[in-house]
Structure formats: structure tokens, C-alpha cells
Amino acid sequence: MRPNDTEPRPAKPAATVLVVDDNPINLKLVSDLLAFEGYRVLKADDGEKAAASVQEDPPDLILLDVDLPGIDGLTLTKRLKSDPPTADIIIVALTAFAMKADRQRAIVAGCDAYVTKPINTRELPAQVAELLQRREKQKPNE
């Protein structure tokens, strides 16, 4: 055993997740669920507030309702993915639309994943963790 193996590793800061949903119940449910899992959670209830939040405090991952008033989720995704400072943020489409064409539209817009509503509260934290871990593995060693 190497000497450093017994030393505690520095704790990684919690990943930041921006939850965007115009339905207050969904916004609270997903936000509370992820906060309970230890994530730092930011919230927005429309596309404009989400865009402002991303500029002010860029998250590691965005859970983004597709059907938002004002700037819809897919339009916001295209904007974020086309802007170099925000292009690498993981974006997960949240939608009540479960048709194959809807999933394809989200992927074409630039979403990294797609989750249908109602949210499965047992699966969502694992899905978020998996996406963040996958992104961490893709980063070059710093």
C-alpha cells in the first residue's frame, strides 16, 4: 500500500444542476430530489431566466423542460450549444412528449439526453450521476 492510499481524498465540490420547468410542482420535485442527492441546484421557471442563470453561474448540467413559455427548451438548447462558453454543458430534455420524433428533435437540437415525464424519482438521480460521470471521463487530464 502506498502512503497516500490511507489519506482522505479531498471532497469534490458538488456538481451544479439547473432545473428549468414552468410547472412549479415539477420544479420543486426535481429540485428537492437532486438537492437531497447532494447536488447544488439552481432553478428557473422559463427560458429567459434559464439563459440568464447560465450566463451568471454556469451549471454542469441542465434539466430543461422542452415546452416552456417564451424561449422554448429546444431553442435555448440550440443557443447554448452554439456558444463556445456554454457548448459543453450537459443538457437533458424533460418532456411529457414521448414520441420517437420528439426524442429525435431534442437530440438534433443538441440535447445530450432525454427524460420523459412523469419523472421517475428513483431513476433520475442515477441518470444525472451517469451523465456527469461520463462527461468527467471525457475531459482531458488537467
Image: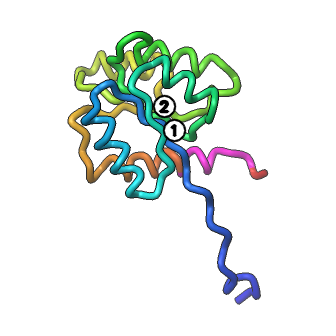
| Residue drawn 53% across the image and 15% down it | 78
Decide if residue 45 is on the left or right side of residue 55.
left
Mark 1: few/some/many CA within 10 Å (<14, 14-19, 20+): many
| Residue drawn 27% across the image and 28% down it | 23
Task: Where is residue 26? Give x, y as percent.
Answer: 27, 35
| Residue drawn 61% across the image and 57% down it | 13
Mark 2: few/some/many CA within 10 Å (<14, 14-19, 20+): many
User: Looking at the image, which is closer to me, 111 or 24?
Assistant: 24
Secondary structure at numbered mark 2: strand
Task: Where is residue 39? Give x, y as percent.
Answer: 48, 52
| Residue drawn 67% across the image and 69% down it | 10
Task: Where is residue 103? Give x, y as percent.
Answer: 33, 23
Can residue 138 be found in the magenta stretch?
yes
Question: Pointer 2 and pointer 1: residues touching (CB < 8 Å)?
Answer: yes
User: Looking at the image, which is closer to me, 70 or 8?
Assistant: 70
Q: Quadrant of residue 2?
A: bottom right
Q: Quadrant of residue 97?
A: top left
Q: Which mark is residue 91?
A: 2
Mark 2 is on which residue type?
A: Ile
The range drawn in magenta is: 133-140
Total numbered circles: 2
Which residue is under mark 1?
Answer: 61
What is the residue that sits farthest to the right in this orientation?
142
Real-space Cα distance between discs 2 and 1? 6 Å
